[in-house]
């Protein structure tokens, strides 16, 4: 390898943030770490438990002490460290609903201590999107709320909590993904508003996060088109990066996963990686390796960038500028870790997980709300029938969680779960829960919802169930602000503010304890 090629390779590696498959670092990844790799992104298949995660992180940092280990750990619906069990904390919408900034900071502090104990340097959180469209299919309960002030206050508190624990933070999805009704995992959303509207509605949480008392470490750009900013998707648009710098942000700009449907075209991830660098990104998140050859995905991006350097499209100096921003962030995170006394290890991670569960339970129980008439499910009475109307796969979470069902089964061992995946199965479920028993009491009906937007399939199924069983109780796991418009006042709705394990347990606990006095 010539000196020129070696310099180019290290410069290219210095902007890459790949994922990898498994709980042990593969040989190609370890070689890249020794050749200047900027960092890695953990997914759930890397982190089956905290002990395994701590061991993996320790190994990677031994090979490359300045490697930036990152993870999507928002809490609530989106968890990698607790993907197997469900998150111990309820997520952003619950924290915004409680609206206690001290609680938000305490939750983030406990989460940060778990991250630090498992060797994570940078949390790809908080979500700073203002969820101004209640039907938003990708943000929803991942946001603190629907107003810029609420999101700004709690986003700042969350970052401050992570920093106290010794972990860096990444605000997403710049300049704001809350005003969309398209999932960017699948296709490109368009926010066709004026720049003035975007500045007023979407940018304040980021501006607050850039202020010195918060000083967020990085931002992640959104895969959406904002024509008022520029003609390309934000993650590939130079004017979007310029806007972030204009607002005072000096840290690394990280792309959302470049394998997402909003930006990946027929040319594959390599060309998108080059365009992202041309657009002002500093770190390229390559995305999940599920069903893919992890090394091949990495080599596609690496090779395309090396070719771009050779062709003059991208200069080594430009790559060095990005690497310098990342290096400053790594140094800052190491200072935070030292100040917090953070250490990576199994014992520390186990203790941190227990502490996280305690504050998570408090937050979830304070967040749960009841809308509509009061009712009560008696654990000593008939076990309920349960119908889950959430048919859309949650791409951000990586699944459609079953924690509400698990909490119901734990409370009511005789619970019957009516699952379906096609119209015939739905008709069978509807018939089964509508039937009146010839003898004995009728079983309560619990319906799980996420986004019964008027005119949607979920709303149609909910209406059919309410017509047959007006006594049903809904456990709503979607965005809480939409409940009055989507449900009206005649249905009892337990508003869980998310579908994570902590949300589910608090919702079922509220349902079994429900009296008129606690109805809000």
Image: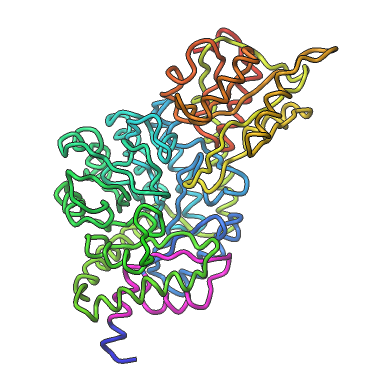
In the image, the segment drawn in magenta is 8-37
Q: Residue furthest right?
A: 439
Place residue 472 in its image quadrant. Answer: top right
Is residue 454 placed above or below 144 in the rendered structure?
above
Regarding residue 394, the answer to whether it shows in the image is yes
Residue 304 position in % (x across, y down): 32, 74
Q: Count up the numbered dots.
A: 0
Residue 275 horizontal side relative to residue 449, left or right:
left
Is residue 329 placed above or below 381 in the rendered structure?
below
Residue 131 horizontal side relative to residue 277, left or right:
right
Residue 280 horizontal side relative to residue 134, left or right:
left
Residue 322 horizontal side relative to residue 480, left or right:
left
Residue 45 position in % (x across, y down): 57, 58
The type of colouring in the image is rainbow
Q: Nearer the viewer, residue 301 or 83?
A: 301
Residue plotted at (19% across, 74% down): 317
Q: Quadrant of the N terminus?
A: bottom left
Q: Is residue 18 magenta?
A: yes
Is residue 176 placed above or below 380 in the rendered structure?
below
Residue plotted at (51% across, 35% down): 90
Q: Residue furthest bottom?
A: 2
Is residue 435 placed above or below 409 in the rendered structure?
above
Place residue 86 in its image quadrant. Answer: top right
Q: Residue furthest front?
A: 424
Q: Nearer the viewer, residue 74 or 232?
A: 232
Residue 297 position in % (x across, y down): 44, 69
Q: Is residue 36 magenta?
A: yes
Regarding residue 406, the answer to whether it shows in the image is no
Residue 101 position in % (x across, y down): 37, 31
Residue plotted at (17% across, 53% down): 239
């Amino acid at each position: 390898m010539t000196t020129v090629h070696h310099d180019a390779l290290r410069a290219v590696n210095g902007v890459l943030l790949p994922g990898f498959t498994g709980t042990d670092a593969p040989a190609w990844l370890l070689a890249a770490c020794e050749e200047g790799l900027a960092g890695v992104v953990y997914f759930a298949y890397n982190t089956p438990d905290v002990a395994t995660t701590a061991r993996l992180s320790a190994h990677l940092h031994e090979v490359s002490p300045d490697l930036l280990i990152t993870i999507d750990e928002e809490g609530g619906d989106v968890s990698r460290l607790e993907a197997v069990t469900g998150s111990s904390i309820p997520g952003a919408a619950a924290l915004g609903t409680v609206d206690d900034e001290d609680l938000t900071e305490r939750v983030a502090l406990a989460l940060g201590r778990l991250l630090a104990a498992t060797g994570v340097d940078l949390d790809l959180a908080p979500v700073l999107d203002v969820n101004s469209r209640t039907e938003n299919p990708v943000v929803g309960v991942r946001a603190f709320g629907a107003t810029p002030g609420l999101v700004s206050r709690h986003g700042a508190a969350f970052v401050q909590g992570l920093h106290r624990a010794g972990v860096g933070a990444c605000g997403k999805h710049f300049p704001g993904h809350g005003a969309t009704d398209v999932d960017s995992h699948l296709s490109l959303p368009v926010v066709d508003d004026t720049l003035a509207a975007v500045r007023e509605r979407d940018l304040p949480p980021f501006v607050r996060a850039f202020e010195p008392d918060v000083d967020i470490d990085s931002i992640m750009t959104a895969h959406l088109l904002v024509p008022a900013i520029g003609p390309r998707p934000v993650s590939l648009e130079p004017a979007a990066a310029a806007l972030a710098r204009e607002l005072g942000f000096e840290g690394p700009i990280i792309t959302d996963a470049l394998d997402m449907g909003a930006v990946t075209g027929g040319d594959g991830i390599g060309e998108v990686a080059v365009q992202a660098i041309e657009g002002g990104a500093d770190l390229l998140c390559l995305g999940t390796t599920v069903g893919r050859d992890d090394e091949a995905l990495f080599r596609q991006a690496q090779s395309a960038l090396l070719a771009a350097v050779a062709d003059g499209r991208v200069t080594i100096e430009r790559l060095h500028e990005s690497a310098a921003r990342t290096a400053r962030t790594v140094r800052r995170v190491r200072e935070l870790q030292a100040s917090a006394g953070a250490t990576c290890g199994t014992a520390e991670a186990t203790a941190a997980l227990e502490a996280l569960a305690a504050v998570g339970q408090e937050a979830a129980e304070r967040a749960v709300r009841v809308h509509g008439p009061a009712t009560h499910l008696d654990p000593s009475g008939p076990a309920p029938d349960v119908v889950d109307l959430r048919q859309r796969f949650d791409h951000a979470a990586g699944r459609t969680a079953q924690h509400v069902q698990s909490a119901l089964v734990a409370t009511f061992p005789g619970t019957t779960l009516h699952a379906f995946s096609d119209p015939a199965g739905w008709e069978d479920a509807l018939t089964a829960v509508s039937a009146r028993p010839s003898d004995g009491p009728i079983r309560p009906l619990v319906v799980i919802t996420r986004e019964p937007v008027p005119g949607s399939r979920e709303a149609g199924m909910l209406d059919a169930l309410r017509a047959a069983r007006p006594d049903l109780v809904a456990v709503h796991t979607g965005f809480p602000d939409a409940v009055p418009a989507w449900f009206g006042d005649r249905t009892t709705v337990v508003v869980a503010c998310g579908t994570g394990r902590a949300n589910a347990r608090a919702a079922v606990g509220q349902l079994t304890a429900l009296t008129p006095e606690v109805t809000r």
